[in-house]
Amino acid sequence: MTEFIIQEKILQTFAHHIPKHLRSHEMVVITDNTVKKLYAQQVVNSLQQTGYTPTLVTFPAGEKYKTRETKAKIESTLLKKGLGRKTCIIAVGGGVVGDLAGFVAATYMRGIPYIQVPTTLLAMIDSSVGGKTGVNTPEGKNMVGAFWNPEAVIADVNCLETLSLEHQRNGWVEGFKIFAVADCQSFHRLLEHKNFPLDLIKRAIALKQDIVSHDPDEKHIRAALNFGHTIGHALEASTKFKMLHGFAVAYGILIESHLSLQRDLISQHEFNTIVEALKSRGFQGTVLKKHDLNLVLAYAKQDKKNQSQRIHCVMLDGIGHVYSHQDKLTHAVTEQAIREAWVCVSEELGHVR
Ligand SMILES: NC(=O)c1ccc[n+]([C@@H]2O[C@H](COP(=O)([O-])OP(=O)(O)OC[C@H]3O[C@@H](n4cnc5c(N)ncnc54)[C@H](O)[C@@H]3O)[C@@H](O)[C@H]2O)c1
Ligand SMILES: [Zn+2]
């Protein structure tokens, strides 16, 4: 089981939080060149002060470096150093570092332990939970990877102070999503805060951890996490990934909430609450006017959740609850219904059906 330690100012004493069974391992800190200066050096210092001689490996920041090539370079560095099975990788950074370093850990010497030290909000509440690791290929995002759980997730929420507003908002959406599908009370509490408070970060992690532990192979309940993601992914792809994932998911949530409203699964009041919450964070439905619905639909038709060539979405049947029908959490929707939702959301007509 992964151990989660989420606290303030934990990096200075990082080494003391390493799980006991890893304390005699060689330590390799993997990070990107932005996080290196901000936080990875602190982790290295703490390890050195405790008697370790860690190896620090960095690569340039950004999604475009989450590749097999970067993975191979890191592996060569570790091999040249003669590091063997008794090595522990420490991934310090956002989701890119976590996915890449986790994938190195999954295959180096047929699998070595690793620790996630997430430094973005998205990495804290989403990507470091659930054991998905991987890299992008020219054919698509996250196409090659493995399920490989970290031994521990050690997060210092003070890292969020240096995160850009854009990445704060990006991560916020995934937290908003998990509360929308799994916890009505936390959903409403989140809306009372400007930031994402520590106790709600812990709550979001616990909820995701609970969902994935019941469905490690992603066959059933984990599908709930895909709320907003059928349309979100399609919109993201239609912008050639220029739009950040969380932003695309925010608009996806608006559309998929409207699909839930169309079926009377959620009330007008609940729909309005979701619209207002996203609007207050700057996610206005009117943004969709700048995007090509036909292109979005074309991508949505390629979504891996689809069955019998029909687009499938996760829906809510209340805030904090996903709709389940015949034991399924994804439901076929017509193109017509998506078009109706798109018009209502982008024209802000959602409030009057
Ligand atoms: N494994 C999963 O289950 C899962 C889930 C969701 C997303 N992901 C993956 O996560 C990745 C996106 O993660 P991300 O949004 O964290 O992006 P990221 O790792 O690229 O980080 C965003 C930027 O912020 C910088 N940064 C990181 N921490 C910082 C800090 N504390 N202060 C200032 N700058 C900081 C990084 O250097 C980078 O430039 C994608 O590749 C996505 O596929 C994986
Ligand atoms: Zn997502």
Image (cartoon, grey):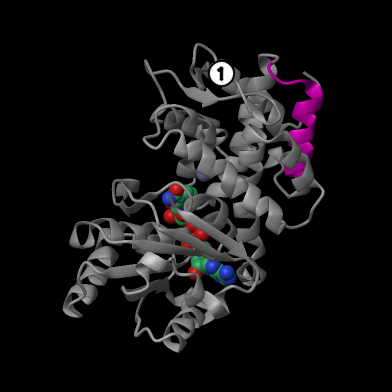
Decide whether the magenta segment is chiefly helix, strand or loop. helix
Q: Residue at x 60, y 53 (%)?
A: 171
Q: What element carries label 1?
A: loop
Q: What stretch is highlighted in magenta?
A: 265-279
- The mark tally for this picture is 1
| Residue drawn at x 58%, y 41% as measured from the top left | 207
Residue closer to the observer: 341 or 121: 121
In the rendered image, which quarter contains the C terminus? top right
Looking at the image, which residue sits at the far front? 20
Task: Say whether residue 267 is magenta.
Answer: yes
Residue 172 appears in the rendering? no
| Residue placed under numbered mark 1 in the picture | 324
The location of residue 243, given as percent across then percent down, is: 54, 50
**Taking 44 as reference, is 123 above or below it?**
above
Q: Which amino acid does label 1 sit on?
A: Ser
Q: Is-magenta flag for residue 34?
A: no
> Is residue 63 found left or right of 194 in the rendered image?
left
Which of 266 and 64 lies nearest the eye of the viewer?
A: 266
Q: How crowded is mark 1: few (under 14 residues within 10 Å), some or many (20 or more)?
A: some
Q: Where is residue 70 in the image (x, y as percent from the top left)?
A: 29, 66
Find residue 10 and report its horizontal and vertical position in percent.
59, 73
- Residue 344 shows up from this direction: yes
Question: Is the residue 31 above or below the residue 307 in the image?
Answer: below
Residue at x-position 66% and y-position 39%? 179
